[in-house]
């Protein structure tokens, strides 16, 4: 009887076994759950690249090559990054209607989901700037005064000091920045589209870019007061000086003609 009693299980043995099983299950979940999530993300990314490749073959390959390597009609897209695709396609510049000195902005023909797929495929061809998050170009934490200083130093030579745009050489032009999505302004600084130089983080930090985007949003807002009176298109001293010459000189000529006519009439009488 003593021998049989010694072999009898302890009352807490079942509880210990249950706790051990729960611990093992929790450990296995912790070990494998992140991998499952990463695998799901990889699958979604692979699907986006696959769909983007189909869109690329239809709308882009005729100029940029079937593998994005470029042709005589379009540059290579290897290494341009997702941000360049989001900007060019999101602003309607691509696909281009016809070759020329400048590809103008036009109505976009792709949905944002399709743009994301195209961007994923082009990004898979080579590393490049990624699409910025909303926090990178929002007004939160931005210094508008600093942005104005940076814009006048780096951008006003082409875009005018309020971003109204301006003419360049050989039929090229710096487009107006009025009404442009803040994300696209940030992406343009990152990627340097067409005639514009790129401003990487080494030349303009992410905070600098954020400041510039906020400055442009402020000066081009309908709520921004203009104490200077008639803006004349916001083109600065060139347009104002031209107006002064035409209006002022024209008025002086008119007065001179009137005085001469009155003098001649007085002499005759």
Image (tube, rainbow, N blue to C red):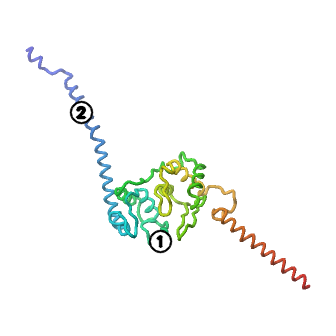
Would you place residue 87 above or below residue 141 in this image?
below
Give x and y (percent) for residue 105: 49, 66
Of circles 2 and 1, the one toward us is 1
Give x and y (percent) for residue 262: 86, 79
The front one of 67 and 183 is 67
State the SS at label 1.
loop
Counting every numbered tag in the picture gives 2
Q: Is 250 left or right of 219, judged from the image as shown?
A: right
Q: Is 198 left or right of 63, judged from the image as shown?
A: right
Q: Residue at x 68, y 65 (%)?
A: 240
Q: Which numbered marker is on residue 24? A: 2
Q: Residues within 10 Å of mark 2 (few under 14, many from 20)?
A: few
Would you place residue 185 above or below residue 206 in this image?
below
Q: Which numbered marker is on residue 9? A: none
Q: Is 217 left or right of 79, judged from the image as shown?
A: right
Q: Is 58 left or right of 181, judged from the image as shown?
A: left
Give x and y (percent) for residue 130: 42, 53
Query: In the current view of this chain or complex, which residue is farthest to the top?
Result: 2
Between discs 2 and 1, the one toward the N terminus: 2
Query: In the current view of this chain or complex, which residue is farthest to the bottom?
Result: 268
Q: Residue at x 41, y 63 (%)?
A: 110
The front one of 226 and 258 is 258
Give x and y (percent) for residue 133: 45, 50
Check disc 1 and report the residue beneath it. 100
């Amino acid at each position: 009887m003593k021998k049989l009693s010694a072999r009898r299980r302890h009352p807490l043995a079942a509880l210990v076994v249950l706790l051990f099983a729960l611990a093992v299950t929790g450990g296995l979940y912790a070990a494998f759950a992140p991998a499952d999530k990463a695998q799901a993300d990889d699958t979604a990314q692979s699907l986006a690249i696959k769909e983007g490749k189909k869109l690329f073959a239809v709308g882009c390959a005729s100029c940029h090559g079937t593998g994005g390597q470029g042709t005589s009609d379009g540059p290579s897209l290897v290494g341009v990054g997702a941000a360049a695709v989001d900007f060019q396609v999101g602003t309607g510049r691509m696909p281009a209607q016809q070759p020329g000195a400048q590809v103008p902005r036009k109505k976009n023909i792709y949905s944002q989901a399709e743009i994301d797929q195209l961007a994923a495929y082009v990004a898979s061809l080579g590393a490049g700037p990624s699409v910025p998050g909303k926090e990178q170009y929002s007004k939160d934490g931005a210094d508008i005064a600093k942005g104005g200083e940076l814009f006048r130093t780096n951008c006003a030579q082409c875009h005018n000091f309020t971003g109204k745009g301006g003419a360049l050489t050989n039929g090229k032009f710096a487009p107006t920045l009025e009404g442009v999505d803040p994300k696209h302004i940030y992406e343009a600084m990152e990627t340097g589209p067409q005639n514009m130089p790129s401003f990487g983080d080494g030349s303009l930090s992410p905070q600098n870019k954020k400041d510039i985007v906020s400055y442009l949003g402020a000066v081009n807002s309908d709520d921004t007061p203009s104490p200077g009176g008639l803006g004349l298109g916001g083109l600065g001293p060139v347009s104002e000086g031209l107006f002064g010459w035409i209006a002022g000189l024209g008025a002086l000529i008119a007065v001179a003609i009137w005085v001469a006519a009155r003098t001649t009439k007085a002499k005759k009488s």
